Image: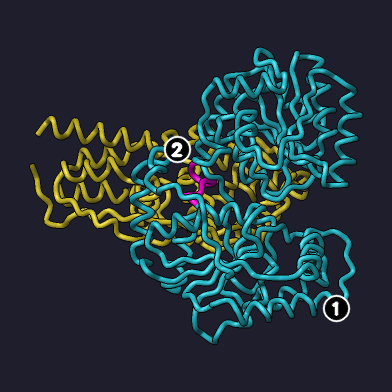
Chain colours: A cyan, B yellow
Amino acid sequence: MSEVLTASRIPLENYAEVVGAGEIEELRALAKPLRGRSIEMINSTAVGGGVAEILNRLVPLAEELDLGIRWDVMKGAEEFFDVTKSFHNALHGEPYHAKPKDFEIFLSYNEQNRATLPLDAEFVVIHDPQPAALIDARKPSSNHWVWRCHIDLSHPNRAVWDFLEKFVTRYDGAMFSSPEFSRQLSIPQYLFYPAIDPLSEKNCPLDSEFIEQVLRRYQIDPQRPILTQISRFDRLKDPVGVIRAYRIVKRYFDCQLVLAGGSASDDPEGALVLKDVLRAAEQDPDIKILELPAWAPLEVNALQRASTIVVQKSLREGFGLTVSEALWKKKPVVASAVGGIPSQIIHKHTGLLAHSVEGTAYQIRFLLSHPQIAAKLGENGHEHVKENFLITQKLKRYLALFLMLDRGL
Amino acid sequence: MNTAETPFDFVTASYLTRIGNQSAGTLAELLTGLEHCSDASIFHHTFQTLGTHHFLTEGFSNDFAQWVLASTNRNDLAEQLTALDIRDYMSIAALRSDLCRVVRDFCDAEPQFAAQSGLERFYFCESVEVTVPLGRSTRNLDEFREGLEHLSHASFYFHFISSRLRLQLQTNDFSLWLSGSLGLRTLADSVNQIDIYTNTLDSARTKMLRLIDRERRKA
């Protein structure tokens, strides 16, 4: 069985409290002409990773709107996923020398999956490079095929991209998370933001008692300013840079720094970064380095809600949904202008962008000195997320896409 | 209460953003882009952005001005671009012409800044509009009020802002119907005067509902 049966179901009606009844009525109106029409979403994993997380939320909502949607996961052995992981990193611009055998393995598993997947829906949505070659199953002028790319293709490895491009240009369109991530292609390209679920454990409202309990557990003082960066221990998230920015701020404000991320125990690179972070922290009792369990959404939610300012000082970034999570909680955010972050942080309107350690420290000091401006940025940020980065908006974008394809616009 | 012969049919619209193959890293490139991009792109970065960023009521006017401010730090040029009001235009061609004039004048006056790289690039995009009827038709002011109160942001934006260009008139769907079908010209004018730059879509709607309530009391 390749079909994924989604476990979590939050009724569409529950979102009316968050986005308003008018928005739900609108989703129903947009879905009406698509009732019963078949849609197939295909990606390479049912659990873990942002794509699976979004599809787990999106598919049940689409079902509730009476769309004939199914979600299939392609199958592959270790050799296939080794190759696609290398492709993934190479497309992100990492050095990689692709061997002919790699392309053969990629094509062979795509061919095997073509034989077992239905691929006959009116709208087929292929996620990311792994299943891109399934397009070979498309019959001439039959159904609509679109490719949703969740990765940054701005500086891809030439050989891997040249290989993939031959498949990608046969789709009816490609969707990217940011204009910056797209390529110059002969097919139309659309902007499809990733999304957060406002009713998930990571984003739902929390009792102040629970938040206080989390702070107590990690010995964080709620009376003093809390600066927080939530991210895995990865050099590209620049946790050491965050500590350097904090030290500058600390000269002027008696603040605390929380660096919280997933456990680095099973990630050799992460463990090295964590070691560097601990060294840089120099046992400062006001720097809390938290290795959270693999899935601790409520703790992350509580730490974000307890923060005075949320920081995302990445050197490179995908879309950076932790920024949307913080904005949704009305938090002022200081973040680097990389990847998809400028789509979320409209400088001086929904947060502040920075380009260096010193710049990050300056913007944090500015916000700590001007709490009213910080609050206004947080309010605006919340509205920005509501308008653009919620799961309901993502669903609406898909409905618009299917209607557009159907009408030949 | 007046009953209209022609009903007002509420419609909802959803917008897809199409990423173009054009981008700009300097003010000179922005000018080239403005001269050559599609009408749909000018629409996207001026009209459409007002809908998606309606909650920003202080200093946000269009994507071009925001990029000039945040990426090139040219406050003077950003201010001039911000001051362009889409309500003053009956065509995209006229709006494009003024956008180009403002940027060209600046580049001519300050050539040292024209080629300076911005912090981030500007990507020219377009909006693709997909409309669907909401199945709600109104013939009098009470029904109209009821429909207006429950509209989504996208639907309100479609009738109140985007319609200005579609109709090539200096009005909007609501005012056009109030005046043309219900004969309520004063109310229509007041609705048309609600400032779309300093109001959110919600606060514009609240003002509109208040104006309608005042009209109903008169009747």
Whole-Å distance between the Cαs marked 1 and 2? 58 Å
Front in this rendered view, residue A95 or B133: A95
Considering every residue shown, the one lying at the far bottom of the view is: A140
Occupied quadrant, residue A283: top right
Q: Which residue is mark 1?
A: A101
Q: Position of residue B209 (x, y in %)?
A: 26, 35
Mark 1 or mark 2, whichever is nearer to me: 1
Indicate the quadrant where residue A338 lies.
top right
Q: Which mark is residue B197?
A: 2
For the record, the magenta segment spans A386-393
Q: Main secondary structure of the magenta part?
A: helix
**B133 falls in the magenta region:** no
Magenta-colored stretch includes residue A389: yes
Please state, as top left, top right, bottom left or bottom right, where the C terminus of chain A lies in the image.
bottom left
Going by the image, does A400 lie left or right of B9?
right
For the N terminus of chain A, the image quarter is: bottom right
Task: Say what amino acid the circle numbered 2 marks.
Answer: Tyr
Q: Residues within 10 Å of mark 1 (few under 14, many from 20)?
A: few
**x, y (%) of residue B181?**
16, 51
Secondary structure beneath disc 1? helix
